Amino acid sequence: MTDASADRLKVVFIGGCSRSGSTLLGRLLDQLPGWQHVGELHQLWKRSVHRNSACECGKPFRDCGLWQQVMHEAFGGIEAVDVQAMRDLRRRAHRAALAGRDNAPAVSEYAAILARILRRVAACTPARTIVDSSKSAAHGAVLLAAGGLDVRVVHLLRDPRGVANSLGRQRTMSGQAIPMERLGAIGAARHWRRENRRTASLAPAAIRLQYETLAADPGGTLRWLLEQLDSPPQTLGFIDGSTAKLAGGHSLCGNPMRHRSGPMEICNDDAWRKQMPLWRQRLVRWLTRGPARSYGYQ
Ligand SMILES: [Zn+2]
């Protein structure tokens, strides 16, 4: 695929709060023919290029064949990338995008770089639709500013108590001794409100999807989602009831479940009901009550 024919490359951006099941959704979409899940692309410079974190395939980023090829075609090689300059540009672009200055030079410049990377992913794979599960609304805003991309926003939501319970647990990124973010109840509630508010303001036509709906009926939800995305219906042979047979892919960063492949039982992770003290559940529910209700969480 050439850059010219890749005009209007379809990109599905999964936005929302962290720990909302975006890795699961991204991996399910990755199983569809012609779809490629790149994971959390907004982490590319820091975690993948700089820290050499593991790709979903298990190899360190710099040893992954797909990403080597993508980076070679986009930049002339991983070593040719000025990581610090990219991180600076990303920071300026994100700041401008969050302030609503979508036409700022940093946004245009960074959007062009993201579009170049995504087109190279499409060129190096059979993909016609790319899934980016970055969630960061700033990253989503930059993507939306990129020319030649048909960006659809899926706003993935999860019960704030589930998010708060997950954010309160210590977790280590697989393959790396880097503890993932850990927040208390108030911090988690604030994070949930802020990230969902930012995602909701990204695109009026964003498709809202609850993690709980996806976990309860992965096949039915994917069929519904494809329809919402104006994508042709697909045979979901990899899903049988609540079991999904997941093949490995090449996503960057995300939940450690991305490194497991084979048949996987999908069920709603509602461990928060037992693990969280009642006072904490109530506190989170109270702190998020307005937006939670508007998103369908009673
Ligand atoms: Zn890989």
Image (cartoon, grey):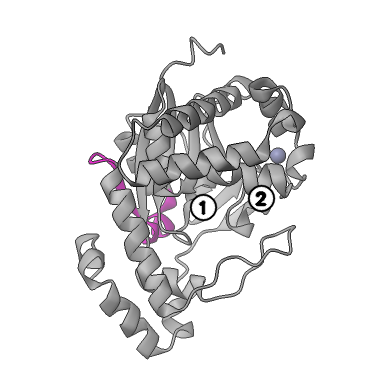
- Residue 241 seen in the figure: no
Q: Is residue 212 left or right of residue 77?
A: left
Amino acid type, callout 2: Gly
Quarter-of-image position of residue 233 = top left
Q: Position of residue 261 (x, y in %)?
A: 67, 50
- Would the CB of label 2 be found within 8 Å of ligand 1? no
Q: Is residue 231 above or below residue 169?
A: above
Which residue sits at x=74%, y=26%? 77
Counting from the top left corner in percent of width and height, residue 184 is at 46, 78
Mark 1 → mark 2, Cα distance in angstroms: 13 Å
Q: Would you say 60 lies left or right of 133 here?
A: right
Front-most of residues 187 and 56? 187
**Residue at the location (68% across, 34% down)?**
82
Give the quarter of the figure containing the N terminus: top right
Magenta stretch in the rendered image: 203-218
Residue 292 in view: yes
The verdict on label 1 being within 8 Å of ligand 1 is no
Up/down of 242 relative to 122, above or below:
below
Kindly state the secondary structure of the residue where label 1 is placed: helix
Residue corresponding to mark 2: 262
Among numbered discs 1 and 2, the one appearing first in the sequence: 1
Q: Which residue is mark 1?
A: 24
Magenta stretch containing residue 216, yes or no? yes
Q: Nearer the viewer, residue 229 or 187?
A: 187
Q: Work out which residue is located at the far right of the displayed protein and give it.
A: 63
Q: Amino acid at mark 1?
A: Leu
- Left/right placement of residue 223 relative to residue 39 reads left
* Crowdedness near tag 2: few (<14), some (14–19) or many (≥20) residues, C-alpha within 10 Å: few
Q: Residue at x 65, y 41 (%)?
A: 84
Q: Position of residue 188 (x, y in %)?
A: 42, 71
Question: Are dots 1 and 2 in contact, CB under 8 Å?
Answer: no
